[in-house]
Image (cartoon, rainbow, N blue to C red):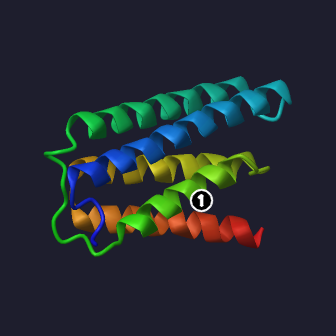
């Protein structure tokens, strides 16, 4: 079944983004405590975390209106990608790679909220590319 073709699937996407935001917060706090991140960078990432939570909440509120037609992407593939990104955020040592992944998740959330198939697929591919690059080290 195509991704985001029902309100329930849009809500599942919102759930996945909410979990990502939780991990972003935990990772920022860990980096601050370990003194691996400058405070200005942490503040910027906290803003990104908040933006991701806002987008997730908007997806919940607007789920029925945000059903996407003709999305050539499977729901399980989309959620699996976000879950992998969330898992990788817990272990990324390089802060610049963490920042890039967070930014790409935000773009994916914004694309989902816009309910436009092309931007959703492009953002999905970018997140998937980040995960692949991180796996290679």
Query: Where's the C terminus, which quadrant?
Result: bottom right
Residue identifier under label 1 = 84
Above/below status of 51 relative to 90: above
The residue located at (48%, 53%) in the rendering is 104
57 lies left or right of 95: left
Above/below status of 67 relative to 55: below
Q: Quadrant of residue 95?
A: top right
The residue located at (54%, 43%) in the rendering is 20
- Image coordinates for residue 76, horizontal then vertical, percent: 42, 66
**Of the pair 1 and 84, the residue shown nearer to us:** 1
Badge 1 crowding class, 10 Å Cα cut-off, few under 14, some 14 to 19, many 20 or more, is some
- Image coordinates for residue 132, horizontal then vertical, percent: 63, 71
The residue located at (68%, 32%) in the rendering is 26
**Of the pair 70 and 137, the residue shown nearer to us:** 70
9 lies left or right of 101: left
Query: Where's the N terminus, which quadrant?
Result: bottom left
Seen from this angle, which residue lies furthest right? 34
- Image coordinates for residue 38, horizontal then vertical, percent: 74, 29
Q: Quadrant of residue 62?
A: top left
């Amino acid at each position: 079944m195509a991704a985001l073709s029902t309100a329930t699937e849009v809500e599942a996407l919102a759930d996945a983004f909410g979990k990502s935001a939780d991990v972003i917060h935990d990772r920022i706090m860990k980096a601050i405590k370990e003194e691996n991140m400058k405070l200005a960078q942490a503040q910027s990432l906290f803003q990104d975390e908040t933006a991701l939570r806002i987008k997730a909440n908007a997806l919940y509120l607007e789920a029925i209106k945000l059903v996407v037609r003709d999305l050539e992407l499977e729901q399980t593939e989309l959620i699996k990608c976000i879950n992998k990104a969330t898992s990788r955020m817990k272990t990324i040592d390089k802060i610049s790679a963490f920042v890039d992944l967070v930014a790409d998740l935000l773009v994916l959330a914004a694309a989902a909220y816009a309910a436009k198939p092309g931007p959703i697929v492009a953002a999905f591919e970018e997140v998937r590319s980040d995960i692949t690059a991180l796996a290679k080290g």
